[in-house]
Image (spheres, grey):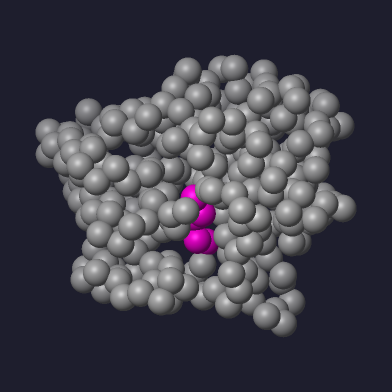
Amino acid sequence: MQLGLCCISLHLKEQGYSFQTMTYKRFSSLPRDEALEILGSRILNNMIVTNATIQHCADNGYCYRVSSDLFPLLTYEQANVSLQDLPNFTEISQALDDIAYTIQQTNVRISCHPSEFNVLASSNTDAVNKTIKVLNFYSIFLDRIVCPADYNSPMNLHINNRQGSNDEVVDRFIQNFNRLDDNCRNRLVIENDDKLNCWSVKQLIEDFYPKTNIPITFDYLHHACHPDGLSEQDALEQCYTTWGEYKPLFHYSENIPDHPNPRKHADYAVGDPETYGLDFDLDMELKMKDKAIAEFLGEVLV
């Protein structure tokens, strides 16, 4: 099993490696040439930070979930910006080559988890169109950095919709899933939810997986919040089987003891995830990021 770092390295942040963003409000307030220059500079910075973080993961034996905010505004229709529009496109392209080289040299497993605003099962046409644009964009990014177009480099998503019966939601999901690029479809996996009115492992296994054959990501904390009658072992083992020949990438976090919101993630792990004798990788969704992983393993970050 490898443990996974999610998006941000606090260890590198202390050394000055921080991601940057840009709002549309700020972008649209500037002359377009100036706005494109600033945006390009920030995206280039994000590529450099991503490359450094992947190398950091290699040095410490981690998987890496890339940030879903690496390319601010590029999928935002009103901004009307493509990567090729940026004045430093050549430098960004070289930085992407550098990331691809680092991945090829280190063999770090790469994944991504687009935000909860991406809802393929939505009944809102605009929301679905935006979701398809974002998911295809990030799959193209994974292609660009030479990640495999399969579940070795998964794109994790929630169904995040309850409009209609389970069958209606799944059918809507499938209809929109089929609009995605091939490489995007080949990477997409679905995660169980933590809220009682959302999709549990049991519901995914019974109503979603038989129609889609899409692997299910097991999230320990989400299942603890919404077990739906399944034990942790049963739920984990059933999710495990959906990945077939691929090594699953599951999620682990703990809640904050005595916090009124049981879904709120803790800074550090106190417990130890039970694997039930199965081999899978595990993204550690703890607030203290790589510092939490190092403490969990009893190691020192390098």
Percent of width and height locating residue 259: 70, 79
Magenta stretch encompasses residue 282: yes
Tell me the residue at 87%/53% (across/down). 229
Above/below status of 218 relative to 13: above
Percent of width and height locating residue 30: 26, 47
Quarter of the picture holding the C terminus? bottom left
Above/below status of 27 relative to 89: below
Tell me the residue at 47%/53% (across/down). 1
Query: Is residue 158 in sight in this rendering?
Result: no
Q: Quadrant of residue 240?
A: top right
Q: Quadrant of residue 13?
A: bottom left
Give left or right: position of 26 versus 86: right
Tell me the residue at 47%/19% (across/down). 181
Magenta stretch, main secondary structure, is strand
Query: Is residue 108 in sight in this rendering?
Result: yes
Magenta extent:
281-285
Tell me the residue at 26%/74% (across/down). 14
Q: Which of 275/106 is in front?
A: 275
Percent of width and height locating residue 8: 37, 60
Above/below status of 218 relative to 15: above
Q: Which of 184/24 is in front?
A: 184
Magenta stretch encompasses residue 236: no
Percent of width and height locating residue 245: 54, 30
Give left or right: position of 173 versus 300: right
Q: Which of 209/168 is in front?
A: 209
- Residue that sits furthest to the front in the current view: 277
Q: Quadrant of residue 188?
A: top right
Give left or right: position of 17 versus 192: left
